[in-house]
Image: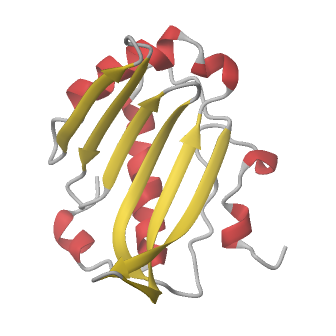
């Protein structure tokens, strides 16, 4: 787990993406018999302050998606929801949304981490884990971190941000 004091000093997209990946790694460690992800995506969303878009700041977002078969499985749709429901209310995390919709076939868990990141576990057609930062300073350098959870290079959509020249 990241030290919350040092986390407060992190204010760039580089650090936010690295912290988000570490949070995803923590989630994987919580899930018994982890089935693996199919795809990873990184997105740097524009950030607005007082209604004005600021080109020097972004929200960093990291998403890992389970494949179609795993997304249809009771393991990701039910078991992981139960595990994360309990875990996201501990260790400095605050679970603020636990909502079933569509007659219980869809589910959303949302928590704030001790580092101030938002963590989502969403069960819909596909099941995914997403970590989202608040506004951070945009830099020209992002961490070159390998994808977690079995994502292959072909399914690692973060590479377009990490290596835009490829």
Residue shown at 51%/24% (left/top)?
Answer: 34
From the top left corner, tell me how far across and down residue 72 is, in percent: 59, 15
What's the image's color scheme? secondary structure
Residue shown at 45%/46% (left/top)?
Answer: 130
Q: Is residue 31 left or right of residue 42?
A: left
Tally of numbered discs: 0
- Whether 165 is drawn above or below 153: the answer is below
Q: Is residue 7 left or right of residue 39?
A: left
From the top left corner, tell me how far across and down residue 75 is, in percent: 49, 13
- Whether 123 is drawn above or below 134: the answer is above
- The image quarter containing residue 89 is top left
- Whether 12 is drawn above or below 67: the answer is below
Pick out the residue farthest to the front: 51
- Whether 56 is drawn above or below 145: the answer is below
From the top left corner, tell me how far across and down residue 66 is, in percent: 60, 31
Quadrant where the C terminus is found in the figure: bottom right
Residue shown at 29%/40% (left/top)?
Answer: 110
From the top left corner, tell me how far across and down residue 47 is, in percent: 41, 77
Residue shown at 57%/63% (left/top)?
Answer: 43
Q: Is residue 111 left or right of residue 20?
A: left
- The image quarter containing residue 8 is bottom left
């Amino acid at each position: 787990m990241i030290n919350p004091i040092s986390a407060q000093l992190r204010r760039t997209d580089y650090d936010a993406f690295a912290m988000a990946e570490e949070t995803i790694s923590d989630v994987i460690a919580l899930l018994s018999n982890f089935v693996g992800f199919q795809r990873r995506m990184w997105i740097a969303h524009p950030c607005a302050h007082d209604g004005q878009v600021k080109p020097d700041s972004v929200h960093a977002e990291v998403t890992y998606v389970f494949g179609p078969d795993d997304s249809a499985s009771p393991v990701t749709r039910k078991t992981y929801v139960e595990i994360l429901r309990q875990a996201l209310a501990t260790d400095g995390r605050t679970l603020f949304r636990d909502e079933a919709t569509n007659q219980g076939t869809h589910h959303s868990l949302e928590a704030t981490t001790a580092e101030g990141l938002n963590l989502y576990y969403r069960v819909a057609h596909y099941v995914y884990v997403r970590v989202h930062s608040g506004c951070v300073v945009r830099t020209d350098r992002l961490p070159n971190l390998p994808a977690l959870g079995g994502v292959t290079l072909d399914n690692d959509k973060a590479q377009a941000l990490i290596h835009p020249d490829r």
